[in-house]
Amino acid sequence: MESIDLIAAKVRVCKLCDLSKGRNNAVPGEGVKSADLFIIGEAPGKNEDLAGKPFIGMAGRFLDKYLSMAGIERSDTFITNAVKCRPPNNRKPFGSEIEACRPYLLGQLTAVEPKLVLCLGTSACTSLGIEYKHLSDIRGRRLDVDFYGVKVKVFATFHPSFPMRFKTKRDTFLEDLKKVKIILG
Ligand code: URA
């Protein structure tokens, strides 16, 4: 099994897809190496690309606030993204990019062995190979996922940029995060 640090070192020099060509820094992810909660976002944005750290911009601050309101501290988690390099103009990552990055996610999940994986939005769900039509089909409840032989408990909710933009979604987002807290015990 590869360590979190070794995976991060490989991600920083990765050239498995074209996203590597436009990046300032790859963003492997960070946090507690044996965290109970493993959070997956979509992709680094501008701030994350510049700093090499996940979720440090507006969506990150919104996420931190809502996690904390639900009784979860980000500092107790491991947090990463479906793809580790910023897509041009912050477009959604292509399926092929998510696929190219998947071995890193698998390595990180194997190393951390979390109690629960929190998927933020559709790219995160796709990165775990979850099949669904609409996020609403799987959002807000616990799922059992076999991720290439690694059995993981998953909870899917919105990407934070969605409730950040649409205020009417904020209560649901908070309720989801409170459910996550309850599952973690
Ligand atoms: N949005 C994401 O999905 N991930 C980040 O790291 C930042 C913004």
Image (spheres, rainbow, N blue to C red):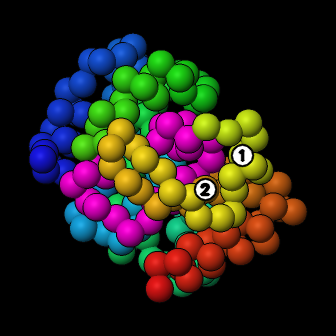
Q: Are marks 1 and 2 in contact (CB under 8 Å)?
A: yes
Seen as rendered, the residue at the extreme right is 168
Element on which disc 1 rests: helix
Residue segment shown in magenta? 108-130
Query: Which amino acid is tagged 2?
Result: Ala
Q: Nearer the viewer, residue 137 or 5?
A: 137
Identify whether 79 is placed above or below 76.
above
Using a 10 Å C-alpha cutoff, classify the residue at mark 2 as few (fewer than 14 neighbours), some (14 to 19) or many (20 or more): many
Along the horizontal axis of the image, is 50 left or right of 10? right
Q: Is residue 29 visible?
A: no
Element on which disc 2 rests: strand
Question: Is residue 126 covered in magenta?
Answer: yes
Query: Which amino acid is tagged 1?
Result: Leu
Question: Is residue 85 covered in magenta?
Answer: no
x 43%, y 47%: residue? 146
- How many numbered discs sit on the rendered protein? 2
Q: Which residue is mark 1?
A: 135
Q: Is residue 104 visible?
A: yes
Q: Nearer the viewer, residue 65 or 156?
A: 156
**Numbered tag placed on residue 175 in the rendering:** none
Using a 10 Å C-alpha cutoff, classify the residue at mark 1 as few (fewer than 14 neighbours), some (14 to 19) or many (20 or more): some
The quarter of the picture where residue 65 lies is bottom right
